Image: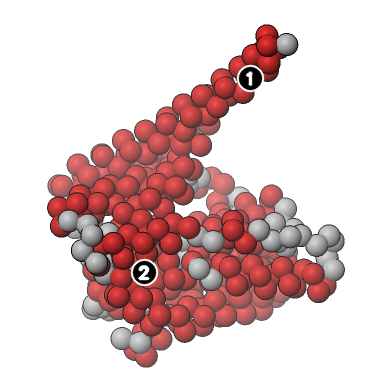
């Protein structure tokens, strides 16, 4: 009996070790690109390591290609590493400032989410885009990109193709925003807080918000991060609304909602880190180190974003869904820009 048990356990252990090795390979590639980005940014400080990380990642992915062995680790970099970077960032931010910035941006975030869904529904129907894609593009543009799409997809029974299509659309305009926003912010002579609020409410994904805002200034990056994390918490009420709609309409089987999975725990840890720093629990030298760690982890995560960008796949998305994503995103950008004067 003991021999049989050992034989059953060994393949599982080997599979787990193989998975860990695969994650480290992709993570190592992302870290290498991040380090190379730091070297280039020392020669071109105006560009900055976050922008270089994405650029190098995009170029590498779409010229040399991406071996499947790197994919799990690259995905790990874009998700978990980014979340850890945000937690470390919390040690350098005042809790009172976080509360003030987050509370002050709530009404604009609600407006942005409303505009995103209304425009998506209206334009999507005109273009005859699939209903699920319309809802996913609205959620991704209004809340937090791919994370919102991943949360909403199972609730509305979206297919893998619809989910992948929607994420590709959102990703395309994330990349555009990273390069366009800093240039537009400088052209409009924006201040750091003004740009931080604009990018935090108008750029889809957290990683893209961080890349664009920190390339503008460190102050803009801090401000935008707080606004974007506040915006990300709206995943919970949106998912509750979608669940209620599914139950009312009796579309297929009712699905129980796992609220614990919807809670962005890294935001809770981010606030906890800020509290510790605000009350003087963390020494100044440690805060400096956590800030440096956060900057490096952000660059690693953005390298992963670049390495995840398959331009060939984006070219196969289709004109109508792409145009839908463009109109919805432009609407959010304009509404956010016009609303800045009412807040700052």
| Chain-order first, disc 2 or disc 1 | 1
Q: Place residue 108 in its image quadrant.
A: bottom left
**Residue depicted at 23% across the width and 54% down the height:** 291
Residue in front for this viewpoint, 311 or 66: 66
For image coordinates 39% across by 72% down, the residue present is 227
Quadrant in which residue 220 is drawn = bottom left
Examine the rendered structure and indicate whether residue 18 appears above or below residue 152: above
User: Element at badge 2?
Assistant: helix
Q: Position of residue 281 (x, y in %)?
A: 23, 60
Compared to residue 314, the image places residue 190 above or below, namely below
Front-most of 337 and 197?
A: 197
State if disc 1 and disc 2 touch (CB < 8 Å).
Answer: no
User: Quick one: quadrant of the N terminus?
Assistant: top right
Which residue, given by chain and number where applicable, does mark 1 sit on? 9
The residue that appears at 73% across and 72% down in the rendered structure is: 244
Circle 1 packing at 10 Å, graded few (<14), some (14-19), many (20+), is few
Which x, y percent locates residue 136? 63, 64
> In the visual, does 110 lie left or right of 184?
right
Colouring mode (rainbow / by chain / secondary structure / one colour): secondary structure
Q: Position of residue 302 (x, y in %)?
A: 37, 49
Q: Secondary structure at mark 1?
A: helix
Mark 2 — residue? 226
Q: Nearer the viewer, residue 147 or 323?
A: 147
Query: Total marks drawn?
Result: 2
Q: Is residue 262 visible?
A: yes
Q: Position of residue 11 (x, y in %)?
A: 62, 19
Q: Nearer the viewer, mark 2 or mark 1?
A: 1
Q: Residue furthest bottom?
A: 342
Q: Which residue is nearer to you in this view: 38 or 186?
A: 38
Task: Give the class, few, some or many, for how many residues have Cα within 10 Å of label 2's Cα (few <14, many ≥20).
Answer: many
- Say left or right for 32 vs 234: left
- Residue 55 visible, this orientation: no
């Amino acid at each position: 009996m003991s021999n049989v048990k050992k034989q059953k356990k060994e393949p599982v252990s080997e599979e787990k070790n193989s998975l860990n090795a695969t994650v480290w390979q992709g993570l190592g590639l992302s870290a290498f690109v991040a380090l190379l980005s730091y070297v280039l940014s020392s020669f071109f400080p105006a560009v900055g390591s976050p922008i270089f990380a994405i650029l190098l990642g995009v170029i590498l992915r779409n010229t040399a290609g991406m071996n499947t062995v790197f994919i799990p680790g690259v995905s790990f970099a874009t998700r978990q590493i980014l979340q850890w970077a945000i937690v470390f960032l919390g040690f350098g931010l005042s809790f009172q400032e976080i509360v003030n910035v987050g509370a002050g941006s709530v009404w604009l975030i609600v407006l942005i989410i409303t505009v995103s869904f209304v425009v998506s529904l209206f334009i999507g129907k005109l273009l005859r885009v699939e209903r699920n894609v319309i809802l996913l593009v609205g959620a991704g543009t209004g809340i937090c990109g791919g994370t919102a799409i991943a949360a909403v997809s199972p609730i509305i029974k979206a297919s893998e193709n619809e989910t992948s299509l929607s994420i590709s659309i959102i990703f395309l305009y994330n990349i555009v925003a990273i390069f366009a926003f800093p240039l537009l912010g400088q052209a409009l002579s924006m201040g750091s807080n003004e740009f931080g609020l604009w990018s935090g409410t108008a750029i889809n994904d957290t990683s893209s918000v961080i890349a664009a805002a920190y390339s503008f200034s460190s102050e803009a990056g801090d401000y935008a991060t707080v606004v974007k994390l506040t915006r990300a918490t709206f995943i919970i009420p949106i998912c509750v609304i979608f669940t209620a709609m599914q139950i009312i309409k009796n579309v297929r089987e009712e699905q129980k909602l796992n609220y614990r999975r919807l809670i962005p725990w890294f935001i809770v840890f981010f606030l906890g880190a800020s509290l510790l720093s605000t009350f003087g629990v963390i020494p100044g030298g440690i805060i400096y180190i956590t800030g440096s760690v956060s900057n490096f982890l952000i660059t690693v995560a953005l390298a992963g974003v670049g390495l995840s960008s398959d331009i060939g796949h984006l070219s196969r998305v289709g004109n109508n869904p792409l145009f839908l994503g463009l109109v919805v995103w432009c609407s959010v950008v304009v509404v956010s820009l016009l609303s800045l004067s009412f807040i700052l």
